Each structure stands twice: as structure tokens, then as C-alpha cells.
Amino acid sequence: MKITLIKPNIGRMEHSLYVDEARMEPLQLGVLAALTPPDVEVVLYDDRMETIPYDEPTDLVAITVETFTARRAYEISAEFRQRGVPVIMGGMHPTLIPEDAAPHADAILTGDAEFVWSHVVEDAQRGRLQPRYTADVGRVQPGTPTRRDIFQGKGYLPITLVQFSRGCRFACEFCAVSAYFGQTHLVRNVREVVEEIEAQERRLIFFVDDNLLANHAAAKRLFRELIPLKIRWVSQASIDMTQDRELMQLMVKSGCLGHVVGFESINPPSLRGMKKTPNLATAGEGYAEPIRILKNHGLQIWAAFTLGHDSDTLDSIRRTLDFALHHKFTFAAFNILMPYPNTPLYRRLQAENRLMYGGKWWVHPQYRFNYAAFQPAQMTATQLTRACFEARSQFNSISSIFRRAWDFQTNMRSLYRFALYLTYNPLFRKETFKKQGMKLGLRHEH
Ligand code: SF4
């Protein structure tokens, strides 16, 4: 038996698919490959930079679907199904809104694949694929180290992705992760994580956890075990980490270079509205104390903002940009607030009749990447789209990259840090302009 794993692209530029030059290994497909019995052949095709050979013989196609890649995933699925090959879809999007994905696949898998994938393979082998597999959430990758051989030769960024935990204990209104996991947070066995890192060659690791520090005690156990490995690593974490001195020290000792930090907003009423509880204690003072602590520990900050909350104005978006420039953040993401299906935000905007594109922006032929998909309270959708693009453009301008480099606590702390800064800032600058306004999917419809 042969299974073909697919990572779909987001969309197209002019008449061809967008090529993501900052692409990372699709970790979830490496885990799926590892869960597959060894006598089953597994191949991976990554639609972000390679052509999918639809006519190559295969017995089952498994597509991982995020909301932004749903439209393209449905196109790919249609190609295989036309050729009589069964398709199963799983991932965040089919779990959040199974009824959207179900008509486009022979089967959908909701929840974490660990707990049902062996049944899927058995059923496919017998030609009896069920329309729906529902997995419980449970311990992450129990006894399952990622299969990394399927990533080889595909030109991914030279950084190894590893997962320690899934989910988050907070419940931010817009967050798809919180909607998926229902505020549960599950961690892997520390020994298995360490063995997985030891089994590969790279010294730079990205922990893809939604909030690596959602459980401080578990994170400390991990960091103690990481210290002897002498790796360097980055991750994503909520800003309340700075209140735990021991956690900060262990983090740095274990090789942490920095985090994606969800600031989301500098506007306390917006934070209260979105229920971003880990930020509330320090936002009022402009996050001065946590930023001081992060910098004193030499941590580089990738600041993530969501813009377009009901208390946001065009002026507050401009002030958010000034805040990011002032602190010389290593990177920053000025994301438009997106109504992901079945999140509390989506349901509220739906009840208030504020969703655009018929509520299904992810498959709408007119929707463009990085465009607002709802009516904001204090500006028009077009103004919000423009203001976010303006913030991204200014933060990633050549002069900003030059000015932000001059921070001796972080970006110029060492040659290595400076090299990372200089490698990734121009790359992200290029992607910012390339992606803006891209159409979703490949097929042309008007
Ligand atoms: S802290 Fe981050 S991961 Fe957790 S619910 Fe909020 S946005 Fe989601």
C-alpha cells in the first residue's frame, strides 16, 4: 500500500502558485508518516514549491488543511478523486468546521491523528474508508518520533520543528487553537522530546507549541533536560512568562534565543474585549516591565499583533507600529483579526451580522490574502486592510531593518544573533510584499 501526504499551498500570484521562500517542514505530516505502519510506503508532496503528480499511482491521499489553505486543498482533492483515488482530510480546519471539508473528501479526520490513524490505514487497505474519524485529544505523540526523512531535499529552512505540547490554558476570543483544544494543554514525555532532538543533526530547533509556557512546571522539566544538549531554540509563548524568574533563567540556560510573543494589542480595552488575560497585568504600562525582562535575558522578540478589534482605531494601529519600532523588535507580525470558523469571535460577528464574503471567506473567490473579512467597528474593512499593510510595509522597510538592528541586548548581542537577524529580516520583507492581496487557491473564478 502507498499513502501520499499533501501540504497544500495558500494561493496564487498571477497564473501560478505562490512559492513560499520561508517555508518550514510540515511537522504534522512527519508525525503522520511516523504513525503509519512500516510496510506502507509514504511519500510527501509540498504544494508550496513542487508540482503534485496527480497521475502517480497511490492508494490513499491525506491532506492537512488549515483555514487559509482550505480552498487549495479542495482543488487538490478534486484532482485525485477524479482519478478514483480516495482522499482523507484532517487538521485544524476540518476539525473546526467538519461540514465545510466533508463534501470535498471521502473521509475526514477530526482531532489529533495519533489516536485513530492506524484504523484509517487498516480501513483504507480493506477499501472500507469510513466517512468520518473522530479522534480524542490525548497525550501528544506518545512513543512517536517524527519521521524526518520525508522532508529531505525539499529546500526547507534549516531549522528543525519539534512539538512539546499542544493547546493552551487561556481562551482568547479569536483563537482557533483554544477553540480546537477547548483550553486543554497536553505535554509530551520529556525524554521522548530529548531523544527526538538528539536523533537529528541540526542545532537550531523551533518548538511549534501554541504556547510553550502554558504550564510552567512542565516547561521547566523540559528546559532542565535541554541544557546538556547545547542547542539553540525559539518558540511561541505568552508574555506572563516574565513573572517567573526561575523559568526565565532555565529558558536562557537551555539555549532559548527568543519567542513569538502574542502582544495582540497595546490597547487595554481591546485586550479585555478579546479576553487576552496573560497580557492584562502589564499592557497598561506599555508592557515596559516584561519587555525589559525579556531584553535583559537577551531574548529576541517576534511581536505578534491582531488588529481590528472593536476598540481599535486607525490611530491605535499607527501607535502599534510606533511601539514595535521603538522597541526594535527582531520581527513583528501585524495580522488582521481573522474570524476563524467556530471560534467565539466568529460566532459573535455572525450574530452581529458583520461577517463578509458570506461568512466563508476561506473559499470565497473574491477574498484576498491579508484582507479584512469582517466589518470593523471603528473603520471600514478597506481601511483596516490598508492600515495593516502600511504597518507591515513600514516595519519591514530597509531603513527600519537597519535601525532595529542596533539593539546590543538582542539583535546585535552576538555575531550569531546578528546573522539570524540579517538572514530572516530581508526574507520576511520579501514575503510581506509578495503575499499581500494573493488570491486563495489556483483555479480562476470570477
Ligand atoms: S494565549 Fe495564545 S494560544 Fe493561548 S488562547 Fe490566547 S492566543 Fe491562543
Image: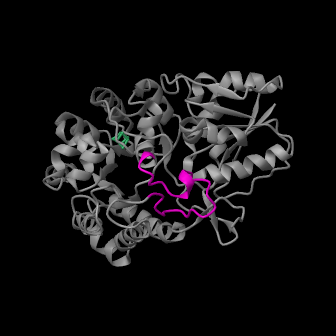
Q: Is residue 282 above or below residue 320?
A: above
Quarter where residue 387 is shown:
bottom left
Q: How is the image coloured?
A: one colour
Image location of residue 336, percent across then percent down = 41, 59
Front-most of 27 and 71? 71
What residue is drawn where x is 38% and y is 30%? 183
Q: Which residues are magenta?
A: 351-374
Residue 71 vs 62, above or below: the answer is below
User: Camera-side residue: 248 or 446?
Assistant: 446
205 magenta-colored: no
Expressed as whole percent of the image width and height from the top left, the position of residue 131 reads 72, 29
Is 285 positioned to the left or the right of 120 in the image?
A: left
Give the vertical position of 23 relative to 100 (above or below): below
Quadrant position of the N terminus in the picture = top right
On the rendered image, what quadrant is the C terminus found in? bottom right
Residue 409 x, y percent position in the rendering:
21, 58
Total marks placed? 0
Q: Is residue 421 above or below residue 361?
A: below
**Is 45 in front, or is 422?**
45
Could you say where residue 405 lies in the image, as x and y percent from the top left?
Answer: 29, 68
**Residue 30 is at least partly visible in this image:** no
Give the residue displayed 63% in from the left and 31% down from the top: 109
Residue 164 quadrant: top left
Q: Quadrant of ligand 1?
A: top left
Q: Residue furthest bottom?
A: 399
Task: Say left or right for 328 vs 44.
Answer: left
